[in-house]
Image (cartoon, helix red, strand yellow):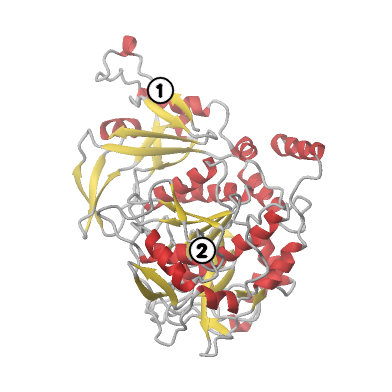
Amino acid sequence: MAVSVQVFLLHAALGSFCVAPRAIAVPTVILQRAVEVEGWKKGAWANANEDLDVVIALKNHEVERLNSEVLAVSSPQSPRYGQHLQPAEIAALTGPQPGSQHLISQWLIAAGVETASLSKWGDRFTFCANVSQVETLFSTKVHWHANIAGKSILQAMDLHAPVHVATEVAAVFGLHGVPIERRKAPRQSTAAAKVTPELLTKHYGVAGVEVSRGAKNRRATVEFQGQYTAQKDVSAWFAQYVPTAKQGDEIFTCFPVDCEPPTHGHVGVEAMLDVEYIMGPAPGIKTEVWSFQNTAWCTDLKDWTSRLLDHDDPPLVFSISYGIQGNVSLDKRMGCSEAVSRNIEEDFAKIAARGISLIFSSGDSGSGGSALFRTPLWPVWPGSAPHVTAVGATQFETFSQSAEKAVTSYGSGGGFSWRFPQQPWQQEAVEAYKQNPGAGLPRAQDFNAQGRATPDVSALGLGYQVMVNGHTMAVGGTSASAPFFASLISLLNEHRLQSGKSPLGFLNPLLYEMAKNGTGFTDVTVGNNHKDRSGIPVREGYSCTKGWDAVTGWGTPVFGEMLQYIKALPSGRHVDKIGEESNRKNLVLV
């Protein structure tokens, strides 16, 4: 339960609630700039009584130390592999400086914000304020913004704060940004195989783990942009496509709100694809749908990561099939500033430290290139963030349904991040790729050769049979391959938990070591991602090669080999209580 911080106006000193205290001149700086998002236009000044939900994230400290801790508990060769950090340890390591919370609360008092809630671990304030209070607090103006479709949202102009406050704030959520664009499903090939759970489990050798159907091993999909699920469709789909399931395996739960469509909503193809294919290939593992709807994209992301980090016992694997192709903070899309996206990525690092796997689709727009021009190539975010696993897409080469190649009806997302550096666990593999003449790399100025490289792995991403509103349709995209791969990880976690071991957590150091040792994956060497999401060729991109490549990563999973590999991993449990206490003391105090 969150700690409540009560913020009161002193009526005796200040008079009635409606009378503002005498202003004291305090130097201010721009805390966060507004972003004019393409397709949205500023309209009328907002009514003073309109309410806004606001989150003020405080700056994290010791971020580099946190990153080191993630590697220490996620690298199989580390003596601390699997010894994931507890939430209190992460808070002690990264939490705000002494006095920061009091300073922010006093700033809120001065602006007339009566009550704010301090998060469970002290890293953010959440409050509801009217437009008048927001404008006073941030020395800004709030306007209605509308797009061509007629949707309207409230947006603030530049946010300001006193210098001493600004130094403690990482980002502000709820006042900038727009809902994520609704995407169209990629075009389907008439030659695509009908992909079902039975085909996937047979093709990838998914066997060897008997599911206990206990409460500890849970997994989840995360849904945004008005995407809702329907239990009746999942139940009917299970009856048709998962004959080995036991009664109750088809049931999922919603968090933090109902994920079934409201009266004005509809069942979403994306949401149904996600939930059906995280559940069907590995039935019996408890599944949740985390639903965040109708607010700005990055605010929704922050709401999700915040609730996850505040949760005492969250699911161990999350599949997320959403992202933005391009320079998120500069290309005027979605309104996510650099500070906002950086704060979310720091949450990803905390989640990784806790031993939770984040699996993102790598996107359906290939390299991000243009059909007409040579231009800098941007991978999808958050799929290109350092602490997530990005999954690309393949299809069968022929009707024989054996060998795979890069998907051809759209571009499997991949490339090199301009925002995040190349990660240590991938440097050797990526360097070999860059030296391979067959990689077909873009012009040197059009990609960041030293950036975080994606995808990490891939799986079939075409022809998935999805039931929506009682009808079955073929759906494709990396948003199909990601939940399927997440289902495999939940099954590997099942084996570790039954053996008294810790969950796999942040996967990438393990996946890259496994592949380097020549096991766990089938290499995909045919194809490229010189296509956009409609299958139209683009000027630049990347090609599949032997080993890791920027189209399909290490290739597609061989489940039996993955299972054998993880059986030999350390348990992740502390040997004795004394050693555990010593470890914890060093972590917090060093």
> Is there CB contact under 8 Å for labels 2 and 1?
no
| Spot occupied by residue 229 in the image (x, y as percentages of width and height) | 38, 59
Q: Residue at x 31, y 38 (%)?
A: 52
Would residue 409 be visible to someone looking at this image?
yes
Instruction: Report the number of numbered marks.
Output: 2
Report the front residue among 405 and 131: 405
Label 1 amino acid?
Val
Labels 2, 1: front one: 2
* N-term-proximal mark, 2 vs 1: 1
| Spot occupied by residue 91 in the image (x, y as percentages of width and height) | 60, 37
Q: Residue at x 27, y 18 (%)?
A: 17
Would residue 453 be visible to someone looking at this image?
no
326 left or right of 426 in image? left
| Spot occupied by residue 388 in the image (x, y as percentages of width and height) | 56, 58
Label 2 amino acid?
Met
Q: Residues within 10 Å of mark 1 (few under 14, many from 20)?
A: some
Return the mark for residue 7: 1
| Spot occupied by residue 217 in the image (x, y as percentages of width and height) | 60, 53
Return the mark for residue 279: 2
133 left or right of 101 in image? left
Q: Which residue reaches farthest front?
A: 247
Q: Secondary structure at mark 1?
A: loop
Figure quadrant of residue 149: bottom left
Q: Which residue reaches farthest left?
A: 44
